């Protein structure tokens, strides 16, 4: 499963459940719904949602999204997933309360999401002639 996240207000999500589709607050104005990868969500929250209460994270299985998702660069070149159309509700597999700390900042990590955050690649196995010990019994 490939997971992307969307920060929104609980009221927006409740409206979407009644409507049968999620449009967010930027689909009409910008043409897409802003999303993040798990490792991007805390910095995004601190940039765009500092001190805001009543937020939730929509955990989205990107493979179930019924419209196009584009990964596009913003500002410093980091690429973010953008959903180009209304989000079908069956692509949302979990909703998590997302509140800032007392100082208004979002901190740490969300334990549930750690299993979806890419881990650093493992070093390659040594091959013959590259410094690793290779036993060759012929």
Image (cartoon, rainbow, N blue to C red):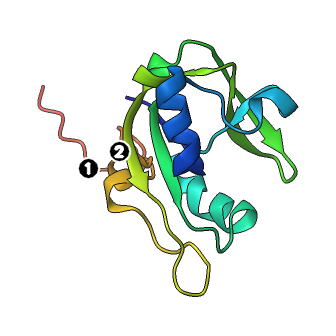
Labels 1 & 2 near each other (Cβ < 8 A): yes
Q: Report the residue marked by disc 1.
A: 133
Provide residue 20's location: percent of width, then percent of height: 50, 20
Residue at the spot x=18%, y=40% of the render?
A: 135
Q: Quadrant of residue 36?
A: top right
In depth, the one of 103 and 112 nearer the eye is 103
| Image side of residue 135 versus residue 81, left or right | left
The kind of secondary structure element at disc 1 is loop
Q: Quadrant of residue 93?
A: top left
Q: Report the residue marked by disc 2.
A: 126
Q: Residue 131: in sight, yes or no?
A: no
Residue density around tag 2, few if under 14, some if 14–19, many if 20 or more, within 10 Å: few
Q: Residue placed farthest to the bottom in the image?
A: 103
Q: Quadrant of the N terminus?
A: top left
In depth, the one of 46 and 49 nearer the eye is 49
Residue at the spot x=66%, y=36% of the render?
A: 24
Q: Is residue 117 above or below residue 103?
A: above
Disc with the residue nearer the chain's start (1 vs 2)? 2
The kind of secondary structure element at disc 2 is loop
* C-alpha separation, residue under disc 1 versus residue under disc 2: 8 Å
Provide residue 67's location: percent of width, then percent of height: 62, 13
| Image side of residue 108 versus residue 84, left or right | left
Residue density around tag 1, few if under 14, some if 14–19, many if 20 or more, within 10 Å: few
Provide residue 94's location: percent of width, then percent of height: 36, 40
Q: Residue placed farthest to the top in the image?
A: 66
């Amino acid at each position: 499963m490939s997971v992307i996240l969307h920060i929104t207000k609980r009221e927006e999500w409740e409206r979407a459940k009644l409507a049968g589709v999620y449009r967010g607050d930027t689909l009409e104005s910008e043409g897409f719904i802003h999303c993040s990868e798990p490792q991007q969500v805390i910095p995004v929250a601190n940039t765009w949602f500092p001190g805001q209460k009543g937020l939730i994270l929509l955990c989205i299985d990107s493979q179930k999204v019924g419209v196009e998702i584009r990964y596009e660069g913003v500002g410093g070149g980091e690429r973010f997933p953008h959903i180009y159309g209304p989000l079908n509700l069956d692509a949302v597999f979990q909703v998590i309360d997302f509140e800032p700390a007392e100082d208004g900042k979002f901190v740490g990590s969300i334990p549930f999401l750690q299993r979806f955050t890419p881990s650093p690649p493992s070093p390659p196995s040594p091959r013959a002639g590259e410094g690793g010990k290779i036993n060759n019994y012929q």
